[in-house]
Amino acid sequence: MSSKYLKIVEEIKNQLTDGTLVAGSKLPSVRQLSEKFCCSKNTVIKAYSELEKEHLVYAIPQSGYYIVNEFNISANDHTIIDFLSAGPDINLIPYIEFQHCLNQAIEKYKKDIFTYSDHQGFHSLRTEIVKNLQNSQVFTEPDRVVIVSGSQQAIHLLAALPFPNGKKNILIEQPTYFGMIESLQIHQITTFGVELSMNGIDLDRLEYIFKNNDIKFFYIIPRFHNPLGHSYTNNEKKKIVELANKYDVYIVEDDFLGELDRDKKSDPLFSFDTSGRVIYIKSFSKVFLPGLRIAGVVLPTIMIKNFLRYKFSADFNSSVLSQGALDIYLKSGMYNSHLKKIKEVYFNKLQLLKSSCEELLPQDTYFTKPDSGFYLSIYLPENVSAKKLALLLSEELILIDDTDRMFLAEYKKDNLIRLCISQVQNHQIKFGVEKIAQTIALLKNKKNYFHNHTSLI
């Protein structure tokens, strides 16, 4: 493919993302773009043709190319502003590229992908994942990687799986990913929590829990935490691994957004592990294709046989067609190019969200300040309910998460909301935060009015 053709496609997608181009906008003529990019008219026509296939633009004979009406997402119309959903930005999903990989996989691996396959996963894909993980400072070998049907399957199986330490209970951060809590409740596993803030966890408290509560494993999201956006320092990660070794506790490291980290010196807990206690989960859902349902788990050798037994009882093996297509996508180098693009987009969105919160939120409202990732959380004033706030905002077509499902019963709070930036467009962010700020003020004033008047009775 021509690099200039790709640049044209990328520029138009970027203008859609940042709101420069809106529904009905007429695009530059073929001649204008050929002059701008110093390329042939055929290159421009090919770029527009690919954008048509993705239903982003349409052509009117004798007139030119236009943005399709589906992209009419002005903050002043009745479009939903979605701070709730956490899938990848739909404008960044590489549909066409991956379609080519699916077609190639059918042709290249047809003898493998339509029959029963290795329960551990397509070997070629495991090899590519190992190569990819080296960029995240995870050094392992294909024999220690198991392909699963998404990271949710991995944590669900691990929750039920007997571990070599013979222990039964599980420790999680509070708050944490709701899918983990759901799995623990379904399996009826005794679960402990350790409170997390943007200052991290209390390591002395962590040691006490490790020492006294028969902990099988500690489930941790080390970078761009869901829902807070928190990231641990390397020193904290090292200390956590040391405590796990000291008290015979395993660690399940869900590093699902680790590839968005801009700090090249930031390492996963896995890199500090010298005794095979860290289980590393590599997901492709949030940064690539959520519907792919493919993830990799790096396991201690001693646990692989038993994990595969549990995996077999769940679904025999994960989709081999998806595995073959992902293998080709990784081999092609397209995945690294995709990551480079989305890292910049999500970083810019989060900076815009933080600056909007700084400017617009009431003074007694506090928000987390992650460097990158998907999530930012807001701590509400004492007398403002997260559930009521979410309900009122939904009536204004602004969706947020009240985080109730992210807490164990004994840790539940009604003063925390989560905002996710992946589904909102840049031009929607400030408007959305302004509406959130106004609704917080409304609820706060109502509570104060009620309290002041009842105190006079």
Image (cartoon, rainbow, N blue to C red):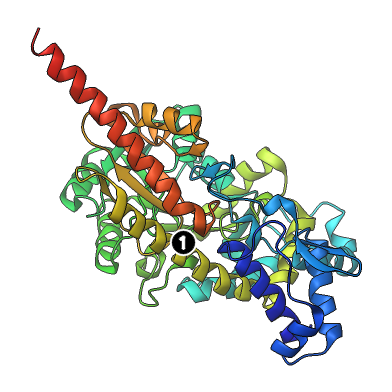
Question: What kind of residue is marked 1?
Answer: Lys
Is 178 left or right of 142, judged from the image as shown? Answer: left
Image coordinates of residue 340 in percent, x first then y, are: 55, 74
Where is mark 1, residue-wise? 349
Residue occupying the point 75% across, 71% down = 328
Location of the N terminus by quadrant is: bottom right
Image coordinates of residue 28 in percent, x first then y, are: 74, 75
User: Image quadrant of residue 213?
Assistant: top left
| Residue farthest to the left, as pictured | 456
**Residue toward you, 137 or 189:** 137
Residue occupying the point 26% across, 53% down = 198
**Residue toward you, 133 or 407:** 407
In the image, residue 156 above or below residue 238: above
User: Image quadrant of residue 8?
Assistant: bottom right
Q: Secondary structure at mark 1?
A: helix
In the image, residue 249 above or below residue 272: above
Residue occupying the point 40% across, 66% down = 268
Is 55 left or right of 307, judged from the image as shown? Answer: right
Is 450 left or right of 232, judged from the image as shown? Answer: left
**Residue toward you, 341 or 322:** 341
Image coordinates of residue 280 in percent, x first then y, are: 48, 59
Q: Is residue 412 visible?
A: no
Labels in figure, total:
1
Residue occupying the point 59% across, 66% down = 20
User: Image quadrant of residue 348?
Assistant: bottom left
